[in-house]
C-alpha cells in the first residue's frame, strides 16, 4: 500500500520499514509557516524549555499530520476499510501525532494505542463505605479522588488525539470483533466506588457529579458509561436528593443515551443483611429482623426513587446470589433471594400506594401502580449465580463455611494466564481491559486480576492511590509485551 505525500514527495509503504527520508520535511508551505507561528497560542501545543527540539518535534508533527490525511483518503477508498482496526496500523508511522498533548507527554504512540484500546475504566474516585460482603474489589473507605482538572486533562487529551486521527479506525477498539476477546463498548468512571458516592471537585471547590462525569466522557472521548449503585440510606437527605436529581436527569432520553446501563445491584451481601444473618446464628432473631428490614427498605426506596427510569430498557435491577447447590448458604442462596425479592416488592407497592394517596409524584392511579410492579417483577425475575472467590468474597466464604464447586477461583489460574499473556502478547483473549487509576497509572485487567504496566499519564496529582485488590505486582506487562508485533493482525489481511 503506497501513499504519496504531495507536500514532500515522500512515498510511504505500510508493508515495509519506514524510508529514511520520512524524517525529512520540506518546510516551504505558507500554511506550515502559519501553523508554526500560531503554535505558541494553541492550548494543546507548547515549545517547552528546549525551543530547538520543540521546533523539530513540531515539524515532525506537521509531517505526520500530512501522512494521516493521505492515509485517511487511501483507506476510505478501499472496499473493506471498515474491517481495518487501529491496531493494524504501524504506530511508527503515526509517532509524533501526539505532539504537545500534555497528558501523553513521554508516551509513544505504541503506549497510547495500548492504553486506549479497550479503555474500560477511568477511576476518578477510589473507595466505598458500603462494605458489602461480596465485593470483587475488596472496597474500603477512601478519600482518594482525581481533581476535575486532572480528569479533563485525560478526556480532552483523548479528544484532541481523536480529532487529529480523523477518520482512521477507532482509537478505543470499538470496531473490533468480540469473538476472540471481550471488547467493552463502555468507559466507566469507577472500579471500587458506588456511583451514588461518586463526585469530584475542581480547584475552586465546585462539585461535579455523575451527570457531569458521564457527559464529559460521552462528549470528549465518544464513549458511553455505566451507572452502578447498591442503594443508599433513605434517611440520608443529601443522598436522597442526589438520587432524585439523577432519576430526573436520566429520565430524559438524550441523557440516558450517554449510559450503556443504569444498574441497581440487589443481592444478599449487603452489610446490614449480613450482620443480621450473623445475629441469627447467635439466636438474636429480633436483630436479624431489624437489619433485614433495614436492607429491604434501602432497596425498596431505591427502586421507588428510580421510578422515572423504570420503563427504559437500559435500567436494570441486577439480582445475584449463591445457587441452590451451594452448601451452608441458606440465607444467601436462590431460595433466600426469592424471599427478599417478594419482601421488597411488597414494600415498593406500599410506597406507591402512599404516593397515590398523597402528592402523586410517580403514580396517578392504581393502573400506574400495577404497571410499575409488573415492570419491577420482570426486572428482578432473572437471578444470577455467577460468583467468584476474589476480593472480599474469599473471607465471606470462610466466615460462613460455604462450599460451592462452581465458584471461580482466579488465584489458581493467574500464573497460567500470565504465561499466556507473555506468549500471546497484550491481546490475550481474557485479559483485554485497561484501567487508568486516580494517579494516572495504567493497569492491565480483567477485574479479578490487575497487572502493572509502568505507564503513567501526565496529570498534576500523581499521589499514589490505594492498592488495587488482586494486584499481581510480580506479573508486569512489560514494554516487550506491549510492543510485540502481532503478525496475525497484518494490514494485508484486510486490504
Image: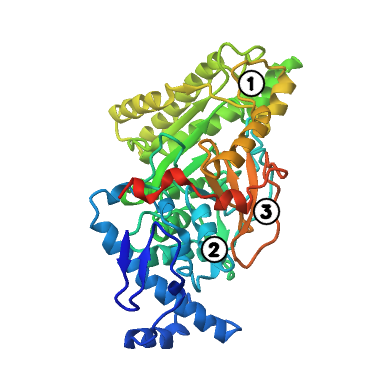
Is 199 placed above or below 140 here?
below
Quarter occupied by residue 403: top right
Bin the neighbour count of mark 2 within 10 Å (Cα to Cα): few under 14, some 14-19, many 20 and up. some
Which corner quadrant holds the N terminus? bottom left
Q: Nearer the observer, disc 1 or disc 2? A: 2
Q: Nearer the observer, disc 1 or disc 3? A: 3
Q: Who's the residue at 70% across and 50% down the image? A: 466
Q: Who's the residue at 27% across and 61% down the image? A: 74
Cα–Cα gap, marks 1 and 2: 58 Å
Question: Quick check: can you spot residue 112?
Answer: yes
Residue beneath disc 3: 143
Near-viewer residue (378 or 395): 395
Is 178 placed above or below 436 here?
above
Residue beneath disc 1: 289
**Label drawn at residue 439:** none
Near-viewer residue (104 or 420): 420
Cα–Cα gap, marks 1 and 3: 33 Å
Between discs 2 and 3, the one toward the N terminus: 2
Cα–Cα gap, marks 2 and 3: 32 Å
Amino acid at each position: 500500500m503506497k501513499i504519496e505525500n504531495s507536500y514532500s514527495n515522500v512515498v510511504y509503504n505500510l508493508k515495509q520499514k519506514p524510508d529514511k527520508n520520512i524524517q525529512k520535511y520540506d518546510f516551504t508551505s505558507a500554511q506550515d509557516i502559519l501553523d508554526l507561528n500560531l503554535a505558541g497560542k494553541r492550548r494543546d501545543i507548547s515549545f517547552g524549555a528546549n525551543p530547538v527540539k520543540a521546533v523539530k518535534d513540531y515539524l515532525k508533527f506537521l509531517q505526520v499530520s500530512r501522512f494521516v490525511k493521505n492515509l485517511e483518503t487511501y483507506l476510505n477508498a478501499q472496499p473493506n476499510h471498515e474491517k481495518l482496526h487501529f491496531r493494524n496500523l504501524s504506530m511508527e508511522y503515526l509517532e509524533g501525532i501526539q505532539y504537545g498533548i500534555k497528558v501523553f507527554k513521554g508516551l509513544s504512540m505504541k503506549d497510547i494505542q495500548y492504553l486506549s484500546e479497550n479503555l474500560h475504566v477511568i477511576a476518578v474516585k477510589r473507595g466505598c463505605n458500603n462494605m458489602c460482603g461480596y465485593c470483587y474489589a475488596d472496597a474500603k473507605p477512601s478519600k482518594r479522588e482525581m481533581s476535575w482538572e486532572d480528569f479533563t486533562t485525560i478526556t480532552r487529551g483523548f479528544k484532541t488525539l481523536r480529532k487529529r486521527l480523523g477518520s482512521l479506525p477507532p482509537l478505543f477498539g470499538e470496531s473490533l470483533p468480540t469473538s476472540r476477546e471481550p471488547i467493552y463498548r463502555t468507559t466507566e468512571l469507577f472500579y471500587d466506588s458506588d456511583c451514588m458516592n461518586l463526585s469530584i471537585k475542581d480547584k475552586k471547590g465546585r462539585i461535579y457529579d455523575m451527570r457531569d462525569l458521564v457527559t464529559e466522557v460521552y462528549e470528549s472521548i465518544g464513549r458511553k458509561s455505566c451507572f452502578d449503585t447498591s442503594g443508599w440510606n433513605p434517611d440520608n437527605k443529601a443522598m436522597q436528593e442526589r438520587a432524585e436529581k439523577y432519576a430526573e436527569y436520566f429520565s430524559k432520553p438524550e441523557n440516558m443515551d450517554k449510559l450503556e446501563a443504569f444498574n441497581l445491584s440487589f443481592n444478599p451481601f449487603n452489610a446490614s443483611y449480613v450482620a443480621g444473618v450473623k445475629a441469627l446464628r447467635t439466636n438474636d432473631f429480633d436483630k436479624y429482623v431489624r437489619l433485614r428490614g433495614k436492607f429491604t427498605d434501602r432497596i425498596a426506596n431505591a427502586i421507588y426513587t428510580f421510578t422515572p427510569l423504570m420503563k427504559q430498557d437500559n435500567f436494570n435491577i441486577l439480582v445475584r446470589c449463591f445457587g441452590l447447590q451451594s452448601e451452608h448458604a441458606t440465607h444467601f442462596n436462590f431460595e433466600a433471594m426469592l424471599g427478599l425479592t417478594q419482601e421488597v416488592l411488597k414494600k415498593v407497592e406500599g410506597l406507591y400506594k402512599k404516593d397515590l394517596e398523597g402528592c402523586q409524584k410517580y403514580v396517578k392511579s392504581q393502573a400506574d401502580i400495577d404497571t410499575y410492579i409488573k415492570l419491577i417483577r420482570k426486572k428482578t425475575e432473572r437471578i444470577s449465580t455467577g460468583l467468584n472467590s476474589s476480593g472480599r468474597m474469599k473471607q465471606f466464604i470462610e466466615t460462613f463455611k460455604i462450599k460451592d464447586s462452581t465458584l471461580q477461583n482466579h488465584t489458581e489460574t493467574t500464573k497460567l494466564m500470565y504465561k499466556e499473556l507473555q506468549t500471546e502478547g497484550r491481546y490475550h483473549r481474557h485479559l483485554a481491559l485497561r484501567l487508568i487509576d486516580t494517579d494516572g497509572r495504567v493497569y492491565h485487567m480483567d477485574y479479578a486480576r490487575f497487572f502493572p504496566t509502568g505507564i503513567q499519564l501526565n496529570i498534576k496529582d500523581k499521589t499514589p492511590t490505594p492498592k488495587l485488590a488482586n494486584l499481581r505486582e510480580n506479573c508486569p506487562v512489560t514494554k516487550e509485551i506491549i510492543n510485540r508485533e502481532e503478525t496475525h493482525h497484518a494490514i494485508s489481511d484486510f486490504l
